Amino acid sequence: MPRGYAAPRTCVILGPVSTADAQASPAPAGQLRPPRHRVSPRAIRYWTARAAAGWAVLAVAQVVWLISAPVDPGWQFVALAVTALAGAAHALVMPRWRYAVHRWEAAPEAVYTQSGWFDQERRVAPVSRIQTVDTQRGPLEQLFGLTSVTVTTASAAGALEIRGLDRAVADRLVDALTATTVRDAEDAT
């Protein structure tokens, strides 16, 4: 292969790709471009529900404390108001921010992920290093029709996780990765 030649790149399309994602230009040399696929838009509602539930537990504990041991109700009301404001801000901002950041892609040579919201991470796992591909659907994920896919590799950095996928997309991804890893039949250690 001539120096500087880049083989045409194909990717496994497992769901709809937005116009902006499809027209994404390649990253400059030495930089990793963002993966093309977003997680399901239902992930926003899922992350909102999880965040709201966590803050609701704290608020209920504060209300119980206020009722059972009113030390200084003024400060307890202030603490409850701060909890309500912080919880509302977190439940409104975080899910949309995560949705804007979380992406994934399965290409013939590797699986790419991008995740996080404050600490953002991009990971690439060569298909030849994949050891297992697992799915997980907790009760709340099932309620929202979502699935998480975990790609375990022979890497000290740990598994790649793609959270918030539609179940059908997750099933196609697992099938595609399984077929690719079986076809390559290389030792993933």
Image (spheres, grey):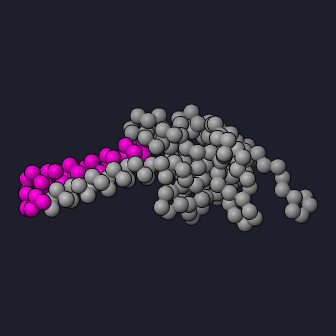
Answer above or below: position of 133 versus 116.
above
Give the image quarter of residue 138.
top left
Is residue 27 found inside the magenta-colored segment of the image? Answer: no
Magenta stretch in the rendered image: 46-74
Give the image quarter of residue 73.
bottom left
Residue at image point 39% right, 39% down = 140
Residue nearer the viewer, 51 or 1:
51
From the image, which quarter does the C terminus lie in? bottom right
Give the image quarter of residue 176.
top right
Residue nearer the viewer, 3 or 117:
117
Q: Is residue 164 visible?
A: yes
Is residue 52 found inside the magenta-colored segment of the image? Answer: yes
Residue furthest right as drawn: 2
Answer above or below: position of 163 versus 126.
above
Residue nearer the viewer, 59 or 13:
59
From the image, which quarter does the N terminus lie in? bottom right
Q: Position of residue 118 (x, y in %)?
A: 48, 61
Name the main secondary structure of what is drawn in magenta: helix
Q: Position of residue 163 (x, y in %)?
A: 51, 46
Residue at image point 56% right, 33% down = 168
Q: Position of residue 79 (x, y in %)?
A: 21, 59
Report the side of 18 relative to 65 (left or right). Answer: right
Residue furthest bottom as drawn: 30
| Circle count | 0
Q: Position of residue 68 (x, y in %)?
A: 8, 53
Q: Is residue 129 visible?
A: no
Report the side of 48 relative to 164 (left or right). Answer: left
Report the side of 132 relative to 44 (left or right). Answer: right
Residue at image point 84% right, 56% down = 6
Residue at image point 87% right, 58% down = 5
